[in-house]
Image: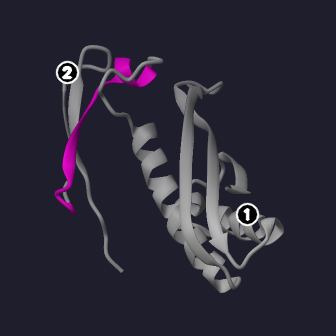
Amino acid sequence: MPTRSATTAWTGGLQDGSGRVELTSSGAGGFDVSFPRRAADEAGGVTSPEELIAAAHSSCYAMQLSALLAEAGGTPRSLDVSADVTLRPDPAGGFQISQIALSVRGEVDGLDDEGFRTAAEAAKATCPVSKALTGTSITLDAALA
């Protein structure tokens, strides 16, 4: 299986510095990062590690759920997945990702609500990004559309 890579070029200190993340494996783009924007309520056009984790988690989860729905006899027509990643002060010092809230609404032929929710919970437990984030509270709100 492949290894994917990203790089960050950073200049300055934490509060006055800034950086640029480049998705080097795919060449799909680059994104500005800064700590003050990371810790602010408004991102101001600058991304953060938490937003990138949210993107990774929502896309990984959608892929895993589509596979599990098919295994359960369903045919996924559409899945709308969001991930909200929360950054909080860590009581031990610094910061921590304290919670990830996944939400999915699906249009699936051949499965009822219970079958959908069962597959959704299994996908939360088995998607590779969820596994990588073991130790972080991950909640799920799943329903058929």
Q: Residue at x 23, y 25 (%)?
A: 18
Please state which amino acid type lies under the numbered disc 2: Gly
Residue 37 is one of the magenta-drawn residues? yes
User: Camera-side residue: 114 or 41?
Assistant: 114
Res 70 quadrant in image: bottom right
Quadrant, the C terminus? bottom right
Q: Residue at x 31, y 76 (%)?
A: 2
Q: Residue at x 59, y 62 (%)?
A: 131
Disc 1 element? helix
Spot occupied by residue 143 in the image (x, y as percentages of width and height): 72, 56
Spot occupied by residue 99 in the image (x, y as percentages of width and height): 64, 39
Residue at mark 2 to residue at mark 1: CA–CA distance = 43 Å
Spot occupied by residue 80 in the image (x, y as percentages of width and height): 54, 54
Q: Are marks 2 and 1 in contact (CB under 8 Å)?
A: no
Please state which amino acid type lies under the numbered disc 1: Glu
Q: Is residue 32 above or below residue 7?
A: above
Disc 2 target residue: 12
Question: Crowdedness of circle 2 by 10 Å Cα count: few (<14), some, many (20+)?
Answer: few
Disc 2 element? loop
Q: Residue at x 20, y 36 (%)?
A: 20
Q: Is residue 31 left or right of residue 55?
A: left
Residue 72 is one of the magenta-drawn residues? no
Q: Is residue 138 left or right of residue 54?
A: right
Q: Is residue 66 left or right of residue 137?
A: left
Q: Is residue 59 above or below residue 115?
A: above
User: Camera-side residue: 107 or 99?
Assistant: 107
Start and end of the magenta stretch?
25-39
Quadrant, the N terminus? bottom left
Numbered circles on residues, count: 2
Residue 121: give its label: 1
